[in-house]
Image (cartoon, grey):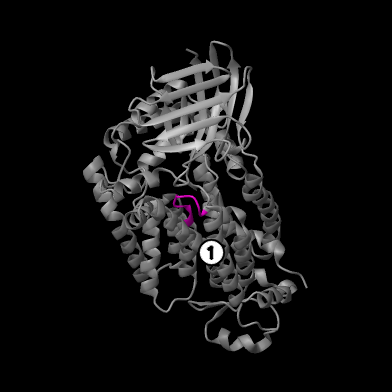
Amino acid sequence: MFDPSPVSQQDGGVLVLTAQSGFGGALSPLRSRGWRIVHHPACSSRNFDSMRLAVRRLTWRHILAICTISAIARVVFLLIAEPPIPVAEDYAIARHIAAGDGFSIYERGPTSIKGPLYPTYLAAWLWVLGEQNGLRAAILVQHLLYAAMPALLFQLGRAIARPTLGTIAAVLFALHPTYFYHATVAENTTWVVVMSALWGMLVFRESRSPIGTALAAGAIIGSFILEKPMLAVPMAMILGLRWWRRWQQLTTAALAAALLVLPWAVRGAVLFGEPTLTKSYSSTLTFIHSWLPSMAVHPRYAVPDSVERALDSLTKLPERQALPALRSLATDILATKWSIMPERTIVHALIFWTIPPRYWQSWSLAFVVVRIVPVVLLTVLWIWGMAILWRQDRPLLLGVLGIVAWVTLVYSLYHVLNIRYKLEVEWLELFVCAAPLVPKR
Amino acid sequence: MSAMVGSQQWTAASGMIEATVSNGVIAIAGMDASAAVQIQLRVVGVSQPGTVQIAAGQPHVAMLSDRGTIYNATGVAGSGTITFSKLTSTEAEGTFSFVGINPQSKLEQNVTNGKFSVRFK
């Protein structure tokens, strides 16, 4: 009855077992040596055999084959369909960097509206291959990163001692049409998703080089502080819990993160008069945007037109001048609208989990296939999976739920303009969505 | 005339908005004060309030010129919607949104939450 592959984790004297039966007295020697035996709730005897069957059906080789097929499909898609590449501020900044104008945007000059890493990544490609081919190459790399994601999810599943869920999540990701298409967008979402999964794998797997792992995990957290600060918060908390009292690893990770953030903070202090620890200009602007009559999801949550005009003028100013005024504007909005914030946050959360209003007119077949269908299917699987995991694997469910709830809350407090926001965490939901798909015997 | 270009708020400067109606073609154009960003809408054969789609087989066009890069939504590439909430022989009011595509580089830009309120010349 013992399946060696899912016996997963030996960590600081804790042996996590994936079956509750079949070991008999075999565990006694371990207990006598001080091991604490934990029976993994996801792998009760009731579904152990079916999980084992699923693991047998899909091996690492199968997952690599899925990754290869996904990579080929993506390259063919890029070559044949030549899809348009949606661009945003990152591309505008990248053009300036590649042209030797520094990290600046439009006519506003130096900017902190985006973190430094993704625009620099784009700029490197633009500089090497020129504007047109450079951007296509950057997008191709993003597609290849997503093609590798099933392998990361498979390994992450093993690292967290949920191999079957990880395997099914890997397959779900490979079949997820939004993730197939969205790598074409010139924004940092693809890197955020892949680096999140990589970070999870690094932190939860057994490492032969704890300091190397700590350096890598810390560097990734540092990059998230710069590019996606919202996710750096749960990452830091998980790291603290996971490496509790492992001061050497925690210190190494903190140093690696600080080293990555420091140059950007110093630049902010020099150019804008305050250290740019994260994206304060962008987040303030985003918060105000969400209250504009043209952007608010309901007139109840809209400020007067005069704010829109004020914002229009402020965004044309250099950021050093604009930021204090933007903060003051945001504070004024909060002071006048605080009583409606809880209601707005709930409405935003519902929108975050469905389709933001700006897409409500886009009912093309492509949009239905790429986004509506996955939203509906994943919502059904998510609810179903939560019900299953509540009984079988509450720690995993609460962990995923905690991260997803945090992301939902932060975006709902700010704004829910864009579909891509949810993609940053949707891959993690796949572990819960996988639960109903664990084959029964 | 205003819109969100990507995630940037754009507002046409006063005096930099033009609207004409001629031979059944309604043309509305706006430019910001620095002349960096320009949006043009062209709608054919519409004489009363309603919504038109920019899609294959339709003659309507929307164009964004963003710092020298052109993004078109036409019957060939891109897509969008233009809604006239008010349309008379002298003035028009409404909303628009479109996805423009650069014909050479295939770059794509979203224009959303567009609004216009113009008097025809």
Residue A402 falls in image quadrant: bottom right
Up-down relation of residue A85 to residue A55 (above or below): above
Q: Is residue A252 visible?
A: yes
- Quarter of the image that includes the C terminus of chain A: bottom right
Dominant secondary structure, magenta: loop
What residue is drawn where x is 58% and y is 12%? Answer: B88
Residue B68 falls in image quadrant: top left
Does B93 sit left or right of A318 as displayed? right
Tell me where residue A332 appears, x and y as whole percent: 41, 27
Tell me where residue A439 appears, x and y as whole percent: 73, 69
Q: Is residue A38 visible?
A: no
Front in this rendered view, residue A337 or A79: A79
What residue is drawn where x is 30% and y is 31%? Answer: A317
Residue of label 1: A147
Q: Secondary structure at mark 1?
A: helix
Tell me where residue A150 appears, x and y as whole percent: 56, 66
Q: Is residue A189 magenta?
A: yes
Residue ranking furthest to the front: B23
Q: Is residue A123 magenta?
A: no
Up-down relation of residue B120 to residue A197 (above or below): above
Say few, some or many: other residues with alpha carbon within 10 Å of mark 1 (under 14 / 14 to 19 / 20 or more).
Answer: many
- Magenta segment range? A183-190
Front in this rendered view, residue A281 or A309: A309
Residue ranking furthest to the top: B90
